């Protein structure tokens, strides 16, 4: 592990220790508050017992108030401490996850398995999604929109301008890496689909559910009812008599109004029930993004001016306040009193309608901004964790060259780096070599780093220059009993997909590993040869890994269109050693005879 990465690991480990100290301290404070609450409760019981034994006196009555006030204060204090503890625990998880990622290659975020598609041009072959994949290495997203955005950028190349803008944005976001840990901690309890449910509620459901608030008479009465109710109550207390009956009828009328609109109120409420804490979390998450004076063009596109002068975070906080007030109905006694005196549920519905009219569009924009930021934060975290990786240079004209290119999913302790460069014009580069020598890994190394480059991310290389290619791969061909597809038929289907794509895409780059494994050696050779000739006629560049040395002989017939490379083995004292270094020319040394000898079989010359 390089020294820079070691210091990053130490930094994460120091943060873990610091967070653990904070958590332990908060737990001690919570225990102290719990004991104090118990003390206040016991004190209240003792005072009540004194009153029962010795009779009521105003001093005893005064004393009963003190433990009650202390108890309520401690309840509020305990709630605040519990929120701090929950947040500290989530931040600890974020730091621990980074340590697990660096040391164990284990990521607690989604691995993108749901996006796996065997028919995709390169996804399965290059380990882009699923367990141990590039998606799993990069992902720091919790929202469904963020996950989809990350998948989209890994499954299809961006245009050059977007790539360069994302490089700039990732660099800028990496400068704020400490804040991104807090950003992620605030989203830690978020369920992937929750943000989309809120978005759907605001855009589609809520406008219809709030139609009943357009009733002007109901709106006027709801606004006036607290004053009317309090006025009648005061009058009844002062003048007594029939005014108490009037007050009772008024309360009954308010109850009837609430009951008449109850089904509509419930529809409005239950779409947001219990979401106030999540909305407050969203507010805190978004506020940080609003407070930074972003310089990169790409991040600036996340912000659009809304109709309201309030920041999106403030608008979300206001919504959370309305939902919190609405939650008073969960307490049967409190909710009943508030509805009898003030038509509380209706008041909250009208407040929500006013908020929706002024701020819902901005909130939807703000919620989507969370997903955009967390997707970009995923790449910024990769950039921070891999300081030796570099941003590629993206060229308009055809070309690819790299120095010290390695596979990002192979731990750096065993990762072997290679240099490589495409010819000035498209060629088919045939890579020969023994089993386990590194042919397949090299092709995947080229492909997976291109995927990173075309997403605007840093690549596992000291230098990489490339134009934008449409990647097409042929590596892990599987048969299918369900589809009644043999390996050979699956291979033909893949070849047809590649030929159809290359015929219409001048930017295609083909990566093939051991073509036509499902047929005999003669047909395999002839089929591979005619396929390479087709690519040559189309001027489609390709890297072609094979054990078949006959194919390397095509260089004689096509000296300008075919190049030979190889990975070899060194045999010393009967032992095989692989250096996994790419070399020019066809392979001369193979390991089949040695491997067969190990199991008791000898090849005759």
Image: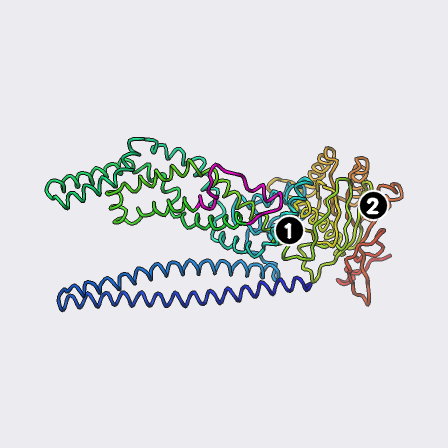
Q: Quadrant of residue 246?
A: top left
Range drawn in magenta? 292-316
Q: Residue at x 80, y 51 (%)?
A: 432
- Picture coordinates of residue 360 (x, y %)? 45, 38
- Picture coordinates of residue 469 (x, y %)? 72, 41
Q: Residue at x 81, y 38 (%)?
A: 536
In the rendered image, the residue lying farthest to the left is 241
Magenta span: chief secondary structure: loop
Q: Is residue 464 on the magenta stretch?
A: no
Task: Decide: is 337 above or below 207.
Answer: below
- Picture coordinates of residue 598 (x, y %)? 76, 63
For the C terminus, give its image quadrant: bottom right
Q: Quadrant of residue 248?
A: top left
Q: Is residue 489 visible?
A: no
| Residue tagged 2 | 551
| Earlier residue among tags 1 and 2 | 1
Q: Is residue 312 on the magenta stretch?
A: yes
For the N terminus, give its image quadrant: bottom right
Q: Is residue 506 left or right of residue 264?
A: right
């Amino acid at each position: 592990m390089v020294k820079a990465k070691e210091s990053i690991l130490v930094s994460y480990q120091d943060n873990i220790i610091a967070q653990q100290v904070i958590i332990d301290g908060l737990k001690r404070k919570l225990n102290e508050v719990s004991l104090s609450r118990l003390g206040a409760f016991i004190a209240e019981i003792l005072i009540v017992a004194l009153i029962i034994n010795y009779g009521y006196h105003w001093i005893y009555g005064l004393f009963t108030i003190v433990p009650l006030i202390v108890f309520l204060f401690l309840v509020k204090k305990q709630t605040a401490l519990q929120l701090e503890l929950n947040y500290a625990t989530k931040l600890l998880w974020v730091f621990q996850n980074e340590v697990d990622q660096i040391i164990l290659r284990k990521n607690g975020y989604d691995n993108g398995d749901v996006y796996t598609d065997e028919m995709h041009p390169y996804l399965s072959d290059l380990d882009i999604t699923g367990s141990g994949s590039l998606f799993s290495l990069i992902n720091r997203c919790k929202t469904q929109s963020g996950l989809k955005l990350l998948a989209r950028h890994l499954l299809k190349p961006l245009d050059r301008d977007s790539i360069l803008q994302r490089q700039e944005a990732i660099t800028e976001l990496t400068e704020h890496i400490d804040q991104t840990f807090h950003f992620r901690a605030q989203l830690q309890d978020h369920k992937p689909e929750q943000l989309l449910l809120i978005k759907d509620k605001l855009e589609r459901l809520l406008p219809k559910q709030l139609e009943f608030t357009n009733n002007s008479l109901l709106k006027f009465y709801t606004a006036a009812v607290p004053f009317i109710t309090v006025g009648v109550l005061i009058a009844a207390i002062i003048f007594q008599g029939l005014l108490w009956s009037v007050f009772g009828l008024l309360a009954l009328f308010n109850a009837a109004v609430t009951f008449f609109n109850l089904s509509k109120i419930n529809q409005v409420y239950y779409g947001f029930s219990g979401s106030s804490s999540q909305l407050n979390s969203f507010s805190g998450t978004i506020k940080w993004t609003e407070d930074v004076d972003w310089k990169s063009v790409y991040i600036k596109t996340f912000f659009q001016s809304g109709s309201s002068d309030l920041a999106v975070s403030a608008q979300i906080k206001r919504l959370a306040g309305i939902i919190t007030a609405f939650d008073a109905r969960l307490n049967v006694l409190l909710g009943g009193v508030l509805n009898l005196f003030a038509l509380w549920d209706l008041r909250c519905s009208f407040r929500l309608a006013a908020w929706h009219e002024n701020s819902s569009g901005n909130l939807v924009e703000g919620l989507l901004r969370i997903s955009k930021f967390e997707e970009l934060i995923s790449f910024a975290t990769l950039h921070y964790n891999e300081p030796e990786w570099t941003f590629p240079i993206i060229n308009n004209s055809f070309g690819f060259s790299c120095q010290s290119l390695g596979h990002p999913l192979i731990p750096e302790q065993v990762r072997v780096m290679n240099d490589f460069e495409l010819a000035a014009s498209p060629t088919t580069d045939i890579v020969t070599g023994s089993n386990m020598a590194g042919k397949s890994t090299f092709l995947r190394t080229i492909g997976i780093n291109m995927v990173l480059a075309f997403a605007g991310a840093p690549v596992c290389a000291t230098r990489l220059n490339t134009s934008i290619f449409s990647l097409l791969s042929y590596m892990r061909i599987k048969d299918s009993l369900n589809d009644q597809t043999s390996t050979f038929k699956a291979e033909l289907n893949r070849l047809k997909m590649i030929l159809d794509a290359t015929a219409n895409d001048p930017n295609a780059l083909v990566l093939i590993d051991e073509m036509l494994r499902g047929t005999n050696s003669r047909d395999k050779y002839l089929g591979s040869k005619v396929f390479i000739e087709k690519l040559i006629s189309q001027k489609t560049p390709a890297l072609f890994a094979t054990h078949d040395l006959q194919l390397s002989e095509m260089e004689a017939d096509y000296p300008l269109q075919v190049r030979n490379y190889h990975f070899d083995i060194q045999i010393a004292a009967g032992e095989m050693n692989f250096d996994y270094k790419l070399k020019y020319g066809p392979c001369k040394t193979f390991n089949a005879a040695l491997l067969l000898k190990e199991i008791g079989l000898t090849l005759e010359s």
